[in-house]
Amino acid sequence: MKKVISMIGTSIFENYFEKEREETIRNFYEDLKEKRLKEYENERERVDRLRNSIRRWIKKEMEKENISAEIKSLIKIKEEIKEDFENYFLCSDTILSKLAGDLIKELLEVPPFNSKVTVKVIEDLQVWNRKEFNKGMSNLIIEIYSIANNFWNDIIINITGGYKATIPYLTILAQLNNCPLYYIFENTDALMKIPNLPFSASCFDWNKIEEHEEWFQKLEEGITDRKDYQDLIRSKFYKDYDFLVWTHDIDSLAELNPIGKIIFQKYKEKIFEFYAPNEVQLIIQSDKALENLLKDQFSDKKQRENKTEIKNGHFVYDAGNNQLRIFYRELENKIYIYKVFNKHDEYEKYLKFTPYSDTLLNINEFKRCKIKREV
């Protein structure tokens, strides 16, 4: 099923005030305009008053499609693609965006729409502080890659709502991953589809990205050490990729800008990373079937979880159609593979006589491993 990712703005409130003349509620709305989500509890009374007023208006409004730009665009997208889809509403880190997302979700989950909706707030996504905006864009990019889960043919990005400042970055993200981008013109029914240009992941030399992976990783976290910063400025990486880096003197001296993060996330999508002791690495390198299983199935979080069973305390991945077994633990978003088997009798013997204990992780020296995936 297709997934439509929509940025959520505040058009629902503006449309409400065009129809309703409640000065007290408008004053509440104006007061909440620049409030971050962390201030929600302090503003609960005004938020609840605003929510209840919008709900009453929605209930009596006959033309539900005109309640917000997001709803109008989603109706038009459905007419265009002619199939149902899941909705993912991505809200800025503000009270009003989250409230708008919740109100639209309430409407779309009941007849006549009956849509499935997930609302997610993107931490630090706001437009009043540039450094925080950079963090927010990073979080937005990571969230979109997470929703896509490598299946970009199923993704549609709807940029009708939300901050205009995100549009250039989302356009590049969509072009790089070859997924459609939709926008509906304000006060019209004209839906615009931004076409995919001959610009895609194939335009990049990903081997060069891999060559400079260490710099990408450092910059993803942010460089705060002055010596590391000087090394960066003198590096071949910076000479080739300075357009992907923001440099400044607040907190971090340098970090990936949103375009850099989009590209590095795409690179990481092509790599399955895990940690394993030498013994396991050697078995994987000598067994093409096991390597392919890791690359094509185990690396996908959903498939991995669906095919994992707990046996004698171990998390054991069993694809079900071969003798390959993978013993692993997932800790702090890192996967530790401590045992693999390609012979059933050896697997049964190990499972019977070796119950799981944390010492299995502690006694092994785990090293970072990478397998290239075709995405």
Image: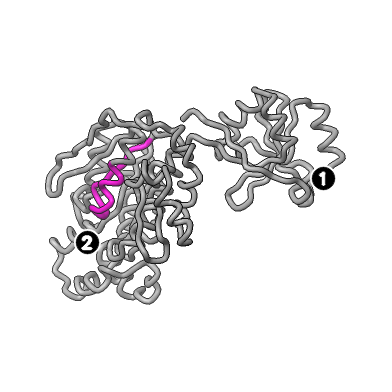
Task: Assign a secondary structure to mark 2.
Answer: helix
Residue at 42 percent of width and 43 percent of height: 237
Please name the amino acid that badge 2 sits on: Phe
User: On the rendered structure, is 298 left or right of 188?
Assistant: right
Residue 135 visible in the current orientation: yes
The numbered dot on residue 317 is none
Q: Of tags 1 and 2, which is closer to the observer?
A: 1
The numbered dot on residue 13 is 2
From the viewer's side, name the closer residue of 65 and 98.
Answer: 98
User: On the rendered structure, is 280 left or right of 129?
Assistant: right
The image's colour scheme reads one colour
- Judge whether 373 appears above or below 149 on screen: above
Determine if the magenta segment contains residue 243: no
From the viewer's side, name the closer residue of 183 and 12.
Answer: 183
Task: Assign a secondary structure to mark 1.
Answer: loop
Residue at 69 percent of width and 42 percent of height: 328
Residue range (magenta): 155-171
**Image position, residue 46 (x, y; %):** 30, 74
Residue at 84 percent of width and 42 percent of height: 354
